[in-house]
């Protein structure tokens, strides 16, 4: 098992660490930008008790690096719900699945158990993760936040990750993140839920994700279409999207109670150079204006 020293037997209350279901069929889509799904985990999110700031941060970061986020899912701290969401994302062709939340020491933190089940592997105590956790508790003891810096059963849970995975440094917390690269070419990344910890862990691991890269150039233009009637605007936009498939077009409707005279339309394109991106956006914009002018 490499750096995984021993299989993790589960919590003190007798709950199994993982059920090692058969691995899902992973056939990531390698045409075009890498497809990504973000899974936010937390019962407090589903109950509306906490606002999810992690998913927007990750979506913006991924988009900036040339990926296409196809879905953002929120699930409670329930092992089956997490398992199902991860498997569905992998089976849909995503090359990267990013989860946030559920890595802590308590019984309701079940993300890594669910991930192991979804990937068809057991959990094991990872020696590098163990060293990270021990060092974190030692720092806390020095600051007199905890009385003891050794491992107990609850703390040992933080050291158990899916077999084949690698721990990710959590600079501002205790529980390591985890990255698991699958034989089919997909990757699952588990991040902490606290925003400060999530951002630091994510920014530390992105350089190692070869599928992600900074986009070379982006151009964005806004225009106000001369109508508030979306039913009139739609056929024009359908034609523009067909003629300029590389341009992302988004409409922003102000509503009929506002003083705006038209719907704002945003055009965005990525290309090898800034000039190429601007040409694509300008062409799509001119096409829309021409259609609006001819009715």
Image: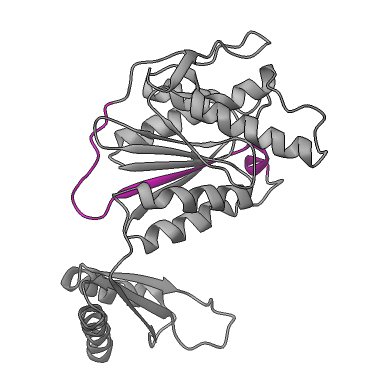
Which residue occupies the extreme top position in the image? 14
Residue 251: x %, y % from top left: 40, 73
Q: Is residue 263 left or right of residue 138?
A: left
The residue at 22%/77% (across/down) is 273
Question: Magenta segment: does it hold 39?
Answer: yes
Name the quadrant containing residue 186. Answer: top left
- Quadrant the N terminus occupies: top left
The residue at 40%/84% (across/down) is 227
The residue at 34%/16% (across/down) is 22
Which residue occupies the extreme bottom position in the image? 293
Question: Magenta segment: does it hold 219?
Answer: no
Residue 196: x %, y % from top left: 62, 52
Q: Is residue 220 left or right of residue 10?
A: left
The residue at 37%/25% (across/down) is 164
Is there any visible trace of residue 81 in the rendered image? no
Residue 66: x %, y % from top left: 31, 60
Magenta region: 25-47
């Amino acid at each position: 098992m490499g750096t995984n020293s021993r299989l993790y037997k589960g919590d003190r209350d007798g709950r199994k660490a993982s059920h090692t279901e058969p691995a899902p069929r992973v056939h990531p889509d390698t045409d075009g930008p890498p497809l990504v799904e973000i899974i936010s985990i937390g019962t407090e999110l589903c109950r509306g008790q906490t606002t999810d700031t992690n998913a927007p941060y990750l979506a913006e970061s991924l988009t900036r690096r040339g990926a296409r986020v196809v879905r953002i899912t929120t699930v409670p701290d329930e092992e089956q719900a997490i398992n199902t969401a991860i498997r569905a994302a992998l089976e849909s062709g995503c090359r990267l699945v990013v989860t946030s939340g559920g890595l802590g020491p308590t019984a309701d933190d079940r993300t890594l158990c669910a991930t192991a089940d979804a990937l068809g592997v057991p959990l094991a105590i990872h020696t590098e993760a163990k060293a990270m956790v021990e060092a974190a508790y030692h720092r806390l003891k020095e600051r007199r936040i905890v009385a003891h810096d050794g491992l107990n059963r609850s703390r040992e849970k933080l050291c158990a990750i899916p077999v084949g995975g690698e721990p990710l440094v959590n600079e501002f917390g205790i529980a390591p993140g985890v990255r698991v690269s699958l034989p089919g070419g997909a990757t699952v990344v588990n991040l902490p839920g606290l925003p400060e910890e999530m951002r630091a862990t994510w920014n530390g691991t992105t350089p190692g994700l070869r599928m992600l890269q900074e986009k070379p150039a982006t151009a964005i233009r806004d225009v106000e279409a001369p109508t508030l009637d979306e039913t009139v605007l739609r056929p024009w936009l359908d034609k523009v999207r067909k003629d300029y498939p590389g341009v992302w077009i988004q409409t922003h409707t102000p509503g009929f109670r506002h003083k705006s005279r038209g719907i704002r339309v945003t055009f965005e394109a990525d290309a090898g150079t800034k000039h190429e991106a601007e040409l694509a956006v300008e062409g799509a914009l001119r096409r829309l204006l021409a259609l609006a002018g001819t009715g």
